[in-house]
Image (cartoon, grey):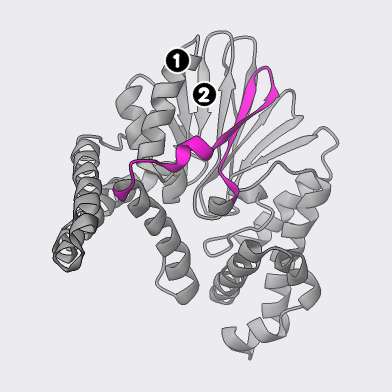
Amino acid sequence: MKLNISNITYSTCKYLLLMCTLLSVKNTYAAVTWDTINPNIQFLKQQEQLRFYDSNQILIKGDKCALLVDTSANFAAVEQLAEDLKKRLKTPLCYLVATHYHDDHLLGMAVMQSFYPDAKLIVHQQVNINFNRYQKEYSDKLDTYEKSIELSYQRLANLPTDEKIKWRGKLELAKKRLFRWREYQLSKPKITIDNRETIDLGNFEIVIEPHQAHTNGDLTIMANNGSVLIGGDIVDWLPYPGHGELKSWQALLKQYINDEKITVILPGHGRTLTKEQLKQPLSFLTALTEHVENNKDQSVEQLMLSFPESVIEPYKQEELNAKSSNFFLQAGLNRAKSTE
């Protein structure tokens, strides 16, 4: 992400989540809930307190193949999920779909590819074009973890003896995990999507579509004859707009709201949604572009102060929403100004 205040905060929260993974024996995977949408689709919902910092996953099963949508940014959690799938699945895991390039959706694919080398990674064509960058991001992230572990060892000298023993054990675990993750590689996609494509998993078809909305390389999946929409971060109730194609994103949300077939919406972050609930992110994104267009002379700081209170108010009803919406608002206003 670009280095502005909102993006630093957003990225830092994700980074802290992964450092907790390195330094803790327990990880957040245990708190992920498996919700059965129907016999073919399971929604792996991230725990509430991490809903803006880590992603949901969706498992889709047919008679012949299974498909996993997105991976967590918590590599230890991805490892546990991979082991869990070996016990749960009665068919091969044939496909891995990254809905977009953000690290909490894509980078964990390196782990899944190690466990399931025959699974074909599916991405938007734009993500494929830039894939060398994401391979490097995976390595860079591990380099950052290694430096953090080294710093933590240096700080041990200032701790009481009993604390030293406890933290030395955590750091040894962190090193083992890091060495293991160094062996994984984010391998290039086998399937790239530039037009709508149908995949038959065995008496269960899904339709994958490319978009430019939350990013310039998003994928969505329609299942159950169009009644289930797996929308990634495009359909988040509180959307992160810092990399968005804002006007095409708004048009897509309007399309979904008016689609009579859709009954269940599975977002990249947070709980399942209804079409009625999609009106809130649409309102937020629309207000971003209109507010910038109508106040061209205002700075981002001024735009934040004058942003319509009625649009942001629904996000202030819960503490985590309130904190995140402030960061997301600033990122969205920056994005709207930069794309005028």
Q: Look at the image and say whether residue 32 sits in the magenta stretch.
A: yes
Q: Earlier in the sequence, mark 2 or mark 1?
A: 2
Pick the residue in front: 153 or 130: 153
Q: Whole-Å distance between the Cαs marked 2 and 1?
A: 15 Å
Residue at point 58%, 45% (across, down):
268
**Residue 163 drawn at (x, y percent):** 24, 57
Residue 238 sits in which quadrant? bottom right
Q: Which residues are magenta?
A: 23-48
Q: Amino acid at mark 2?
A: Leu
Farthest residue to the bottom: give it. 297
Other-residue count near label 1 (Cα within 10 Å), few / some / many at <14 / 14–19 / ≥20: few
Residue shown at 80% from the left, 34% from the top: 263
Residue 22 shown left or right of residue 250 in the figure: left
Give the image location of residue 178, x and y in percent: 22, 43
User: Viewer-nearest of labels 2 and 1?
Assistant: 1
- Residue 333 placement: quadrant: bottom right
Closest to the observer, 236 or 20: 20
Quadrant in which the C terminus appears: bottom right
Look at 23% across and 59% down and name the residue there.
Answer: 148
Mark 2, secondary structure of its residue: strand
Left or right of 96 on screen, residue 302: right
25 displayed left or right of 294: left
Q: Amino acid at mark 1?
A: Lys
In the image, is residue 264 part of the stretch drawn in magenta?
Answer: no
Which element is circle 1 on?
Answer: helix
Residue at which label 1 appears: 87
Q: Is residue 39 above or below residue 106?
A: above
Residue 56 or residue 23, whichever sits in front: 23
